[in-house]
Image (cartoon, helix red, strand yellow):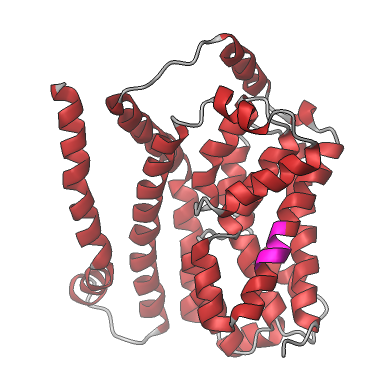
Amino acid sequence: MNSIKNKIVAVILLIPIWIIIYTNLQEISDFIVFKLFKMTDETHLTKSIRFFCYEVPKVLLLLTLIIFIVGIIRTYFSPEKTRKALEGKSLFTGNVMASLLGIVTPFCSCSAIPLFLGFVEAGIPLGVTFSFLIAAPMINEVAVVLLIGLFGWKVAVIYVITGLTIAILAGFILEKLNLNKYVADWVFKTQAKQGLEKEESMTINQRISAGGVVVKEIVGKIWIYILLGIAVGAGAHGFVPDEYLAGALGSQNWYSVPLAILTGIPLYSNAAGIIPIVSVLIEKGVSLGTALAFMMSVIALSLPEIIILKKVLKWQLIGIFVLVVATGIAIVGLIFNYIVFT
């Protein structure tokens, strides 16, 4: 009992500390840049360093909190419960249900992966799990609210519809290709083992511990890639002229959408972090479809996500997954570029 109380108290005490740090990140980053480093304001290097010092702790703080919560939630998503929720459903119906479940779980791609693994381990069809993995980071209430505020409800509605379509059809296609042989062998061994185990209830103490383990595993594996991705973003923020982006990614260039997708994949962000950047790109002359294709590729095909997936999938399947989703995103980008919203 004391152990349970101690962990609950620790969580309660850490929450206000997290809030204080997160809400004062800009002041902390400015102190580091201008007081400790004594850098001159408004130089290209200063802009890049300031961006890096602010974004790195912001992303890591958000990831830690969200993955911890997801880790606890995952303890309620046992393989047996998940199997029952989707058993008896046709493939396409399963894709739709998984995509809708992804919409109501506002997680970034990296924190959605624990639930994705739970789906695979539960014996849910691989294509259905991919529908969830695509929809979860790409379509959520944060993205919808920001899109409505920045672009209007028409763009937001079409974004949701096209994003949902990508998730459903991509998952359906991946399942039809029968790619289970490219899933790591240990995943199916885990599945078989779990099928023999009787489901047991967990205590609050065990659920909190499970959340901490997930944070340690995932953040421990991807932090270096997050640093690299933000470093690239910081360099672009400080040194790449707005006119260059507008010229390279304007709708008049046929290659703007594919280029935006290729540029977005190595980066990492969630919807809340990338949409304001997309808004700035559009203000500087980047076409709407190209900017949204960039956004989708960042949050649905991020490099950290791909690295984590490598733990459970072989490169052949990862390559096909990226190709199918990137094709869907490219189609959406072209639709947004050439449809006039009135």
Residue drawn at 59 percent across, 60 percent down = 139
Work out which quarter of the rendered image holds the N terminus and state it: top left
Q: Is the magenta stretch mostly helix, strand or loop?
A: helix
Count up the numbered dots: 0
Camera-nearest residue between 235 and 293 = 293
Residue 114 lies, with reference to residue 36, above or below; the image says: above
Does residue 302 appear anywhere in the picture? yes
Camera-nearest residue between 38 and 191 = 191
- In the image: residue 123, left or right of residue 149: right
- In the image: residue 279, left or right of residue 252: left
Tell me residue 164's x, y (percent): 70, 58
Which stretch is magenta?
160-164
Task: Tell me which corner region of the image, top left, top right, bottom left or bottom right, holds residue 278.
Answer: bottom right
Residue drawn at 79 percent across, 36 percent down = 90
Task: Tell me which corner region of the image, top left, top right, bottom left or bottom right, holds residue 172.
Answer: top right
Residue 98 lies, with reference to residue 231, above or below; the image says: above
Residue drawn at 34 percent across, 73 percent down = 50
Tell me residue 87's x, y (percent): 69, 28
Task: Tell me which corner region of the image, top left, top right, bottom left or bottom right, holds residue 295.
Answer: bottom right
Tell me residue 205's x, y (percent): 27, 26
Work out which quarter of the rendered image holds the C terminus and state it: bottom right
Camera-nearest residue between 323 and 339 = 339
Residue 162 magenta-highlighted: yes
- In the image: residue 136, left or right of residue 70: right
Residue drawn at 39 percent across, 39 percent down = 215
